[in-house]
Image (cartoon, grey):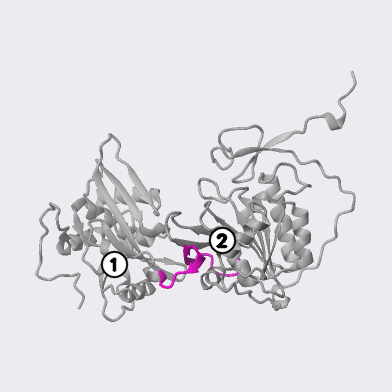
Amino acid sequence: MAATPPAARPARVRQVCTECGAVAPKWQGRCPTCGEWNSLVEEPEPRPVTRSQPAAAAVAATLVGDVPAGSLTWLATGIGECDRVLGGGFVPGGLVLLGGDPGIGKSTLALQLAGHCGSEARPSLYCAGEESAAQVAMRAGRLRCDGREVAVVAETDLDAVLATVESLRPPLAVVDSVQTLHDAGQPGTPGSIAQVRGAVHRLLLCAKQTGVPILLIGHVTKDGAIAGPRTLEHMVDVVLYLEGERHGDHRLLRGVKNRFGASDELGVFVLDAGGMREEEAPGRAFLDETTLGVPGNVLTVACEGSRPLAVEVQALVAPTRFGLPRHTASGFDLGRLHLLAAVLEKRARILLGQADVFVNAVGGVRLAEPAADLAVALAVAASARELCPPPGSVVIGELGLGGEVRRVRRLEQRLQEARQLGLRTAVVPASQAGCAVPPGMRCIPVVHLGDALALLDEAAGPWPGMACTTVKKVATDPWRAP
């Protein structure tokens, strides 16, 4: 029997994890390396490469102190909030990855950036893989973007996109999106692991060789992570996420990785019919004084990078109607909420075993730092006891497992922001009681969670119109500012 010709043999496939890139011998529901579920996908095995040339010789290494500083200049985007997150603007030859949920405004922001960076003499390049040129022009007209500052090409072939970038050398190139590019030299369909990894690698080489900054728009999975291999975020220079409530007005541009500046900055935008515009007062963007008089609503000041941001934390404690109580968090880590609930039960004797606990950070803000722990714990306790914190107060502090209130970073900047918002009283960790306090503000140091709860019981009043437990009144109100 004749052997099967090589061209007729079926291509061998392998199972590759989209999170860690590990190769499994067969498909499994869970990756044996990183433990993620449903992360193994099938892709053809790469063909063995035979070396036709001798190995390259070693190159001479140069001391870092002897390397010339260079003359790289930042390319300002013309949007202050974007420059803040990027560290000053785009760096020549930099590769920036922008991710976010569908409909959050990624393409809108990218087109506005292209319009600001380009000019009539040297327009930016917008490579649309999901839209036609006419659709991009329609969106540019809605955004009042000058059509002479952006050149558009509707193309998904990677070779054609790279050739266009090398030929035009625009001040900024936008690829919308990287999951639509197709590399003829890589196996698989557009969006597969091999295709995305190969496309980003070639785009990275193109950016470094031509000096053109490239902005990539990436899809995200249902978990909020950028689709494709996890190595994608390691290959690029800057990783940005556009966040916010889809049905709200505010959008947050969060820096996750930045090789040229701080990686934890935050930009605040407002999305309207005219596109993305900068928030004029970011500190007040998520503040609503009319809702602070409700039991369970506590104000804190989060610090995103170098920017303090006032955030209202809402908590609701209600008797459970089922056998198993629920804990739900929006804008706050659910595991952290479980921890704080356990601390409240163990250290403060607030029984939550038969109650559902809901926590919400108003405005779509995601509180990732532990400095909001004390505010969340007080909000849950206030909702359970039907008490209201006094108006004009702010709570800042990290909470330990023993109930101790721990130090936080940038406390002075947080207090300064709170004073500018008209707040006069702040509950702070006792270990930072000696920090500089803005004029007209009083700081109440607390050592333990019980101290903060005692202040709540002494000074907070019941919510009008509700049957609450009687609150003990004292002659000296510790919350009252001088």
- Give whichever of 257, 133 is nearer the camera: 133
Q: Position of residue 22 (x, y in %)?
A: 64, 42
Residue type indicated by callout 2? Thr
Residue at image point 53% right, 58% down: 105
- From the viewer's perspective, is the residue at label 1 or at label 2 nearer? 2
- What's the residue at 28%, 34% (across, down)? 323
Q: Is residue 252 above or below residue 14?
A: below
For the N terminus, the image quarter is top right
Q: CA distance from mark 1 to mark 2?
A: 36 Å
Dot 2 falls on a residue whose secondary structure is: helix
Q: Secondary structure at mark 1?
A: strand
Regarding residue 159, the answer to whether it shows in the image is yes
Question: Of the residues under marks 1 and 2, which one precedes in the sequence?
Answer: 2
- The answer to whether marks 1 and 2 mark residues whose Cβ atoms lie closer than 8 Å is no
**Residue type marked 1:** Val
- Position above or below: 314 against 20: below
Q: Position of residue 223 (x, y in %)?
A: 50, 46
**Relative to 140, is 194 on the left or the right?**
right
Q: Residue tagged by mark 2? A: 108
**What's the magenta region?**
259-282
**From the viewer's perspective, is 135 left or right of 337?**
right
Q: Position of residue 187 (x, y in %)?
A: 74, 42
Compared across the picture, whether 153 is left or right of 339 comes to right
Residue 394 circle label: 1
Q: Residue at x 86, y 25 (%)?
A: 4
Q: Quadrant of the C terminus?
A: bottom left
Which residue is farthest top?
Answer: 1
Q: Where is residue 32? Give x, y as percent.
A: 58, 37
Residue 201 lies in quadrant: bottom right
Between 444 and 250, the one nearer to me in the picture: 250
Question: Which quadrant of the structure image shows residue 112?
Answer: bottom right
Tell me, yes or no, whether the highlighted magenta stretch contains residue 268. Answer: yes
